[in-house]
Amino acid sequence: MSRAKKGSSSEPLPLDETFWANYGLTDQSDTRDKIVALAMSEISRRGILDVNARSLCDLLGVDYSLITYHFGSFDGLLAEVFVHVHDIWVASIKDALNESYSSPEERMRAVLQAQINRAIKYGMVVGIALLPQVSENVTRILNEKFPSRLAAAVGFSVAVMSMLVNDLRAGTMTDLPLDIVREPEDVLQSPFAGENPVAIRIQWAMIGPTLWMTGAGGGNKEIAEVDDQLQVNEQVRLFIDRLIMSAKES
């Protein structure tokens, strides 16, 4: 699986069943959900500065007023996009944890790889959502409409990673309830809170390769060629291996 290519001015993908399925939707899904999904796709394809409410509505073939009706404003739509990207993050972790593994190392690797896979699948919007303060107004809407929502997603990832670090060191495979974090402060009360510092360090370390794999980290032809030469997938695998080894030894 190669690194996502940077967005271009090429034509958007056809809005057919295959496109909507990529976002867990169908052609019959609500227009509101389709707008969020299309915004994610266009931000990754073109960059956030080249996407606006009218361009999205023109692509979808709906009236521009639906942005105001459903989201209050284009900034309101952006806020919902960022929340949705964090929801996908949580879902990808849960999906990884629901699989069967032969060792704690294998399970930790799968959870970390799930973050990379999410970046490859959804592209640049994942990177932008990691740092959602694109404007004061978007931040205000996030704080007012979705208080603590993004923090809860981060808290969940830290709580899970703390459990994985604990299991890695103990050689155990804890069956973790996946609702361990309902509020951001719950991460401090998790059974594995003592491993939080290592878990946070791992999550910080993952931001770099996650951003790179969205295609947002430098996208000119020369960098893309170097990227191919470095066999980026192998480099990511080695990076994850080193994180796991560091967690085990720290």
Image (tube, rainbow, N blue to C red):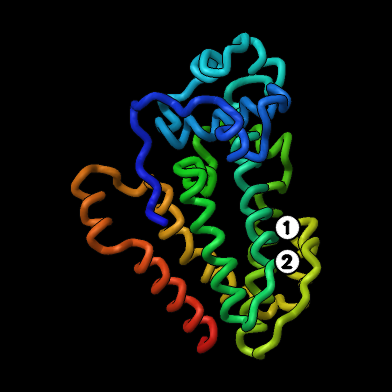
Q: Badges 2 and 1: C-beta atoms under 8 Å apart?
A: yes
Q: Residue 81, labelled with which disc?
A: none
Work out which quarter of the rendered image holds the N terminus and state it. bottom left
Of 201 and 177, which appears nearest the observer? 177
Cα separation, mark 2 vs mark 1, equals 6 Å
The residue at the point 62 percent across, 12 percent down is 62
Q: Residue furthest front?
A: 17
When the figure is inspected, residue 28 is found, relative to residue 112, above or below; the finding is: above
Of 194 and 68, which appears nearest the observer? 68
The residue at the point 77 percent across, 63 percent down is 178
The location of residue 241, given as percent across then percent down, is: 45, 77
When the figure is inspected, residue 47 is found, relative to residue 118, above or below; the finding is: above
Q: Which residue is mark 1?
A: 184
The location of residue 229, given as percent across then percent down, is: 23, 60
When the figure is inspected, residue 148 is found, relative to residue 72, above or below; the finding is: below
Q: Which residue is mark 2?
A: 187
